[in-house]
């Protein structure tokens, strides 16, 4: 539906550092500092995944991108489930992210069963993605957070 390559890992949303720690091998100090400064919010941090994280999430890379969402509805969903939630953007791969639930319905007309309308998104920028498996951490995708 999104046209997302299977070689591209999925993002996981978590609700706490405790949930994060259950998914990753370690949290380097530089990554922890970025998290403390920008979480909850649109910063995705790529870390070494524990072997228990499914290959469908890591795409066989051994890494996982994780963030604590800044949106209260997304955070409430993760908390209600008590488990990480995969969260690719609601747009065709490579297209700009939608700003409203109506935009999502229009993009995927007839292909999705449910859209949760939590209001207009704050911006149109994707999350900033930082690879914290290397020192110093490197920006993989510029986005809503400026580092």
Image: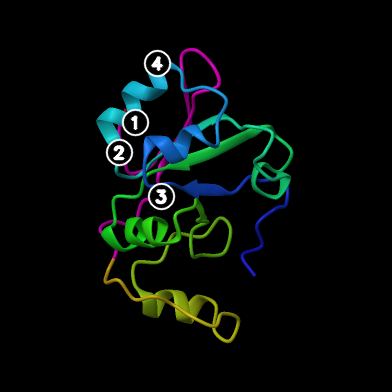
- Marks 1 and 4 sit apart, C-alpha to C-alpha, by 10 Å
Magenta stretch contains residue 137 = yes
Mark 3 sits on what residue?
A: 126
- Marks 4 and 2 sit apart, C-alpha to C-alpha, by 15 Å
Query: Which residue corresponds to the image point at 44% horizontal and 54% vertical from the top-left?
Result: 82
Mark 4 sits on what residue?
A: 29
Q: State the predominant SS element of the stretch in magenta.
A: loop
Of label 1 and label 3, which has the lower sequence position?
1
Magenta stretch contains residue 87 = no
Mark 4 residue element: helix
Q: Are marks 2 and 1 in contact (CB under 8 Å)?
A: yes
Q: Are marks 1 and 3 in contact (CB under 8 Å)?
A: no
Give the mark toward the camera: 4 or 3: 4
Q: Is residue 47 above or below residue 74?
A: above
- Position of the N terminus by quadrant: bottom right
Q: Position of residue 16 (x, y in %)?
A: 36, 41
The magenta segment? 121-146
Q: Position of residue 22 (x, y in %)?
A: 52, 36
Q: Are marks 4 and 3 in contact (CB under 8 Å)?
A: no
- Marks 4 and 3 sit apart, C-alpha to C-alpha, by 24 Å
Of label 2 and label 3, which has the lower sequence position?
2
Of label 1 and label 4, which has the lower sequence position?
4
Disc 2 packing (10 Å; few <14; some 14–19; many ≥20): some
Q: Position of residue 45 (x, y in %)?
A: 46, 34
């Amino acid at each position: 539906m999104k046209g997302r390559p299977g070689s591209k890992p999925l993002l996981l949303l978590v609700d706490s550092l405790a949930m994060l720690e259950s998914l990753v091998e370690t949290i380097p100090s530089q990554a922890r500092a970025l998290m403390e400064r920008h979480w909850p919010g649109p910063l995705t941090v790529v870390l070494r995944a524990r072997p228990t994280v499914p290959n469908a999430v890591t795409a066989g890379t051994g890494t996982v991108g994780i963030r604590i969402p800044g949106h209260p509805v997304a955070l409430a969903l993760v908390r209600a489930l008590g488990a990480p939630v995969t969260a690719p953007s609601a747009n065709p791969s490579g297209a700009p992210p939608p700003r409203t639930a109506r935009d999502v319905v229009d993009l995927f007309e007839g292909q999705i069963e449910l859209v949760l309308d939590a209001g207009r998104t704050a911006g149109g920028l994707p999350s900033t993605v930082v690879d914290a498996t290397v020192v110093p951490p490197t920006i993989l995708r510029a986005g809503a957070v400026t580092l």
